[in-house]
Image (spheres, coloured by chain):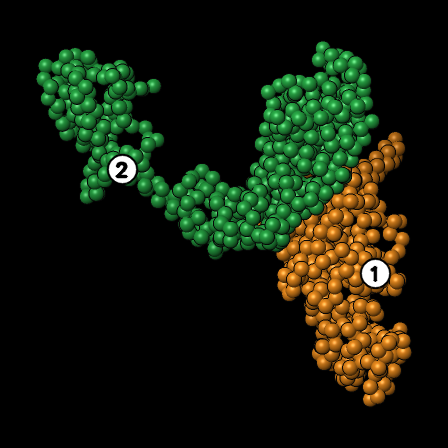
Amino acid sequence: MYFHQTVGGHATMPLYQASKDRKDEGLKIVDVLGLESTMKGVEILDLKVMIEEMESIDVPSVFICPISLEPMQDPVTLCTGQTYDRSNILKWFSLGHKTCPTTMQELWDDSVTPNKTLTHLILTWFSHKYLAMKKKLEDVQGRVLDLLDMLKKVKGQARVKALKDLRQLVAANVFARRTVSENGGLALVCSLLGPFTSHAVGSEAIGIIVNLDLVSELKRNLMHPAKVSLLVDIMNEGTIETKMNCAKLIEMLLIEGSGNGNETEIVSSLSLLVGLLRLVRDKKHPTGVLTGLILLKAICSSHESVRSSVISIGAVPQLIELLPSLNKECLEVALYILEVLSTLPEGRMALKECPNIIPNVVKLLMRVSERCTQFALSILWAIYKLAPEECASKAVEAGLAAKLLLVIQSGCNPVLKQMSSEFLKMCSVNYSTSILISKCMLSTIQ
Amino acid sequence: MGLLCSKNRRYNDADTEENTQTAEIERRIELETKAEKHIQKLLLLGAGESGKSTIFKQIKLLFQTGFDEAELKSYQPVIHANVYQTIKLLHDGAKELAQNDVDFSKYVISDENKEIGEKLSEIGGRLDYPCLTKELALEIENLWKDAAIQETYARGNELQVPDCTHYFMENLHRLSDANYVPTKDDVLYARVRTTGVVEIQFSPVGENKKSGEVYRLFDVGGQRNERRKWIHLFEGVSAVIFCAAISEYDQTLFEDENKNRMMETKELFEWVLKQPCFEKTSFMLFLNKFDIFEKKILKVPLNVCEWFKDYQPVSTGKQEIEHAYEFVKKKFEESYFQNTAPDRVDRVFKIYRTTALDQKVVKKTFKLVDETLRRRNLFEAGLL
């Protein structure tokens, strides 16, 4: 790490490590010299611009200024033979030093000699690399344009291959994505999705679309029921990667309501919901689980009618069963969904019907995160209110009272504390204080 | 000694020969069983007149050698019969409405057509129909154009008037030609009630031409009969193609004029879903007769059918058609999930919008069905 402090005058300097690979560096420079001839007649580009645009590139150490550790734009050599960037070494001198920063020798001659050879080498090297980079980008651009052109003409297997190639380019390369967006590529790929699109074509097209930014016009276009059905079908039949792409695309369509608020209705067919539950239950693919849960949350957050559908396909018991195997991130989303579903009477019923629901949810309190505790508490509350007498005993047996005390005593947000104390009051209605306290003690001992 | 030896040898020879034959037979049985396993069986199900046989004919046209001249010609009497049956239905229907309906005057056949009407009605009631001559065709056409008959046709949904009526009536001249050979389209429209089981074996030829999938398609009759007795014979089929004519939401059954056809389809669909023999079978639901549906929906509201009574129209024209279609589709989807036990929820279920008479649509649809079934096989073999 390099820290440059000018306050007070003394700057701390790292010791310049001579490159162990001098020989390799030398070869590289010879290489550059060799290539110089191919660049005759090429415009000399602005070094500063090139250095900026190629930030991440590996610059040979001989080109680096020992003071700033940046490529030198105006290298000058001291009498000791060491080379620095002019502005940096002058600054060093202006602070009153009369030594060579790396060798620490006292300078017998304070002249700085411009190192013309090194300047030339640096400029040549950067120009070469820059042009190579530009060419590569042009190649990518050319390839993308070729593929887009092909997509307009071919069908069948050739179309599938073209889409596959385009998808790989778009996934790996920012420039490819830009080229597609700027040349009507996105609209073209979207137009390939229709009621008779095969799975092979559809899954590749979706893989491309998901990597790009959808403008609202295209979103509206994709919200057509036939196209949404296609998305759902492909999701249900595809590989895990395809499933996730479809889920992400549907989520993209739901964000930013370009319609009149009933996007969720359009999108939420039973086939989609059943498919999402299947995705969410797939323990072999945890990223898929999270993607599915996120979409399910987006869907449940909207219209009540959709929530009923979600409950009707048995989402509640399936999610409850899933909870123990979820990581923290997934757990928060899953509990959010269950909490939203618990606002409906059929949701509360479904929750109550789950075997061992109360002990399983109580276990989650104060275990994972504050948000999880909040959702879990809301869920318990909803169940409790449905059948207070029945649930009271189960809840207390499960150690709910102890947990509630824990919440109240902890540093949780005031809303949560309020909820807990009200809940505790409800519990104590059915139990005498002494029994409640003894139950608390027992639970905490456990 | 020699005799004994030679006798023994003859017996031994006979044994060996028998063994060889047995071995050969067993080998052939084994080969054929193996071959059978690779044949994917598809079962067409659906209520009467849902379009199953039309799909069947389309597959024949698309993936087999189609209909040769002899087969086309063989449909000529069927088509003529359809013409007679239809005009009789319309005529008798008009008479009934003229007697019982509130607006009876609309349905009174004009004087000049009355006699022709009676004659055609008599012909239509026979077991054997005469050949459709030019004269008869002209008479039928005049009757068809009668205002009363047109009014009756407008109420065709109450009278079991078949969907091919308009098509045949408009083509009477061609159908009555002396050298008439039915076209492919004529054959597709021709209506014969399927009895028993019909099957064809075919291979959908893909672009790469080496698509080795072999399918065998079975078409069973649609009318009410003892389905439960024979349905289990179809256990192990790769897929059930269930045809539902969505245009018949305002029509009643041929077998039972008090039962709405859509309700019958709904019940049949639910019954089929619950059959144990189809536990693992893929279901392809063809929502058929979309072409008739899209014309009807703008005139007859969906909620005349009890199943669709909660339908609310939202707009007009094309948007309304799409909205109505999506509503019907959602209803079928709901029915599917309500009647599928949790352990079966993973079987393939896809819905297709079809117009069985449109060959292009059927071809494209079948391509998708084929892809789905192939992917399913790969999935089950663990290769996906």
Q: Residue at x 88, y 33 (%)?
A: B4
Image spot of residue B311 (x, y percent):
74, 57
Can you say whether B3 is above or below A400 in the image? below
Which chain gets the orange colouring? B
Label 2 sits on residue: A49
Of residues A191 and B302, the one drawn nearer to the viewer in this rendering: B302
Asked which secondary structure carries label 2, the reply is helix
Label 1 sits on residue: B260
**What amino acid does circle 2 point to?**
Val
Which chain gets the green colouring? A
Asked which secondary structure carries label 1, the reply is loop
Q: Residues within 10 Å of mark 1 (few under 14, many from 20)?
A: many
Image spot of residue A306 (x, y percent):
68, 44
Image quarter of residue B67: bottom right
**What amino acid does circle 1 point to?**
Asn
Of residues A224 and B39, the one drawn nearer to the viewer in this rendering: A224
